Amino acid sequence: METLATASEALKRCSKCGGCQAVCPLYGETQAESYVARGKIFLIKSYLEGKVELSPKMKELMSLCLLCKACVDNCPNKVPVDQLVLAARREIAGEKGISFIKKNIFQNLLQNNGNLSLAARMGYLYQHSGAQGLVRKTGLLKLISDDLAKKEGLLPKVARHPFRRQVPRVITGSRPRIRAAYYTGCLTNYVYPGTGFAVVDVLKRNGVEIVIPEQWCCGIPALASGDEASAAALARRNIETFTRAGVDAIITDCASCGSMLHDYADLIEGGEARGFAGKVMDFSQFLNDAVDFQPGDREVPLLATYHDPCHLRRGQGVYAAPRKLIRGVPGLEFQEMKEADRCCGAAGSFNLSYYDLSNRIGKRKAKNIQETGAGLVVTGCPSCIMQITHVLEQEQSPVQVMHLAELLSMTYAGEADCDLRAG
Amino acid sequence: MIPPSVIDEIARVVGEENIFISLEERMCYGYDGTPNAFIPDLVARPGNTGEIQAIVRLANRHLFPIIPRGAGTGLSGGSLPVNSGVVLDLTRMNRILEIDEENLVAVVEPGVVTFAIQQEVERRGLFYPPDPASLKTSTIGGNVAECAGGPRAFKYGVTRDYVMGLEVVTPQGELVTTGGKTVKSVTGYDLTRLYTGSEGTLGIITKIYLRLIPKPEAIKTLMAVFTKLDEATQTVTLIIKRGIIPVTLELMDDRTIQCVENYLHLGLPVDAGAILIIEVDGARDLIESQAGRVAELCREGGAREIRTAGNEQERNEIWAARRAVSAAVVQIKPTKISEDVSVPRSQIPDMARKLREIALRYHLDLVIFGHAGDGNLHPNILCDQKDAEEMERVEKAVGELFQAAVELGGTLSGEHGIGTMKAPYLKLETGEAGYQAMLAIKQALDPKNILNPGKIFGGEHLGNSGHGQ
């Protein structure tokens, strides 16, 4: 990982041309120079030169980054802005510490799947026991802050049972030709089990033996908050169980997790981490490159468009495979949207920390989606799905949002394999 | 420093959410595309002309400098707060007010990004030609204030050729309207031209009337490789003499070609003396024959290889080399001192020779590329801002290259403006009387020196070494 001390070479490469303004979603909404990459780089440089301190304002400005890498991609000198911002966050976390709540989440909750499941269960109960209804109806949160009430609306419906508890550890279809591990990610596990079933369905029908080892959060929330130690601890656990599984590939259905798993090679020294990272493949890329994928015959007579998750397109260089797979769906018509690779504003927990700003970025995405006239928007990241669903709902748009796996699973006749469900 | 009570007054004008007070945020408005940086006392972001007038009146009462700023992409230091004061960030005023297709005029606010205007008018089959390299980020207000150019300038002219009228807040806070939608206008002095390129020293531009033209139907791109630089520059003259006006005539010298090739491995001829990228545009059925004619003339001029783009992808391949130049050359050394001297076209070979001599004498890395059609070269010196001894040599070399340009009948700045970077050299070109005439205009219009002080008439030598931080 780049540290601020080793970053000065990269900082020097910024020629201050300002080209990042054209692509930064935060700048697009605010036109604030302190939010754009050039401003952040200048501040980091000024900090290293002792001209500015790690003040609360500095902390705020460094947290105001989506890590969407649009600036990196567009930069004539390829300054790794996201890495520099992460390094600054680590430095700030090291100097000033991180919040009590975040510390508890990264160092306790995320490191212990039992506790995490318990938290998810409590979330589920909140949403189904009538407590949520009561809170919403009474406007209790609005009394505290309007913003808090809006954020509560962003919280997804927690699944009754986590996905991983509903499926066996090894799933074998007929005549498997390749053995792959499935890293489900927290959102699929706790919020979108339907995506998990779709992934398993599609893989199984295409000759893949699926292993689902014990697994933990990928660590990106901790790393994005500057807590490298917690992220590394999670990485070590994941590397250990997945290495023991002895598979040819590690498949992810979440762009952010996938990008993070690739980065384990930078986070942890040694061949095992490199070996692990080398096997990580996005679901779409795996279907396209590693197996002879065949969609089903059932037609999906919809006009569909595709949103590029930042961590898929720029994080992992995957953009052709999902489009090819979507175009291959029988009966479906594909229409590219404007700015398909512009961030939707979710950016991990950014949409919770900066709800209004994130929502403004999301609205632009919603507009671009609606302008295509599509009835369906497909993407490859549960976090994007959550955000895009939220912004489309606000516009009262009938456009459906779906993970690529769910779309592909729909092409097979009959229901997704229900017999997988244990509970 | 501006007293807190005055800051409160400004905050009441634009709203609390539209000022930046923190050191960190102010620092982000103290730099531009040059290596220099300063720290303003305050950043104010007005949303309309009335707010600007109110702030200017406050400046007259409390005597603080106002520095108008667009996207901060300038290359001459025009928007740097050299004497602190209030940076007036105009990016919130970013509306396209009107596109008048009957009269071929666009009316825009200063904070609109130039590229956004171009996209909007091109959708209607119209064209706003000026294309500075920064057009995807720079604002039209900044383009007008610095009179930006670009590769298309040779055929289509620079920003000033498209400004038909302006609305300007004077240094006293009054509103002046110059020109408008009429093609002809000789009512008194041509204030439109005076404000255009005045670098924010005479007024704050709040509305711009832009001339539009019909969009050319098609474009054709060629690349010609020459063994010698002289052959390339003489070919430029030859093409023009034969009555063809290409839309662009971009030149890259041998050192530039080598840098780009090392960086991107595009398969460029590293033993070539120069490359010309030539584009012709116009009616679809005419440009094919015109492109053929250009190819012939290149061969006549000694080109050893000519590539003609048959489609958009091939066109992009040719442009990839030119677009990579900025990134490629900083691989040599991190700091790029980008000059934009212009000489009469016929003097390009002499100018190139002089530039080489100067670089050699001061042991500096120098690459030459730029717009050969209009004689606007971009000699770039690659150096390291942290190396004080080297920066001293750079300063001397820059002085000499300005001298050389003026001696060849050229100008200090084709399209970047004087700002702070070239202020010490202004008299080289204007002479004492010219300088005094300009100064008299500044003093007459802005006697309290409120607007953008320290620019154009900087006097004090700021150099290239990042003072003031």
Image (cartoon, grey):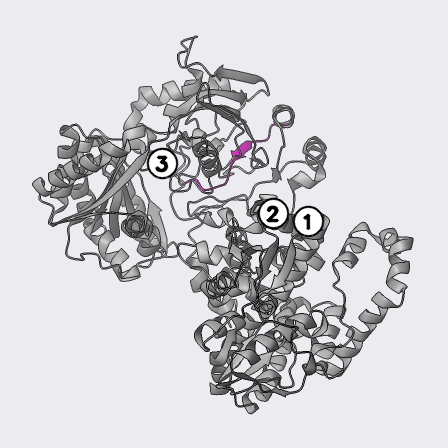
Magenta highlight range: B61-74
Residue appearing at x 59%, y 56% in the figure? A377
Quadrant for residue A251, please give it.
bottom right
Residue appearing at x 64%, y 64% in the figure? A383
Q: Where is residue B220 drawn, in percent x and y?
A: 26, 40
What is the secondary structure assignment of the residue under circle 1? loop
Q: Is residue B47 left or right of residue A176?
A: right
Question: Is A282 drawn above or below residue B130 in the view shown?
Answer: below
Q: Would residue A32 be visible to someone looking at this image?
A: no
Residue at mark 1 to residue at mark 2: CA–CA distance: 8 Å
Question: Was residue B67 drawn as part of the magenta stretch in this picture?
Answer: yes
Q: Residue A370: which numbered mark, if any?
A: 2
- Tell me the subunit letter for badge 3: B
Q: Residues within 10 Å of mark 2 (few under 14, many from 20)?
A: many
Q: Residue B422: which numbered mark, if any?
A: 3
Q: Where is residue A62 drawn, in percent x and y?
A: 61, 58
Residue at mark 3 to residue at mark 2: CA–CA distance: 50 Å
Residue appearing at x 81%, y 54% in the figure? A149
- Please, what is the three-letter code of the amino acid marked with disc 2? Gln
Q: Where is residue A156 drawn, in percent x and y?
A: 74, 63
Q: Where is residue B466 drawn, in percent x and y?
A: 43, 48
Q: Nearer the viewer, residue B249 or B393?
A: B249
Residue under pointer 1 = A397
- Please, what is the three-letter code of the amino acid marked with disc 1? Ser
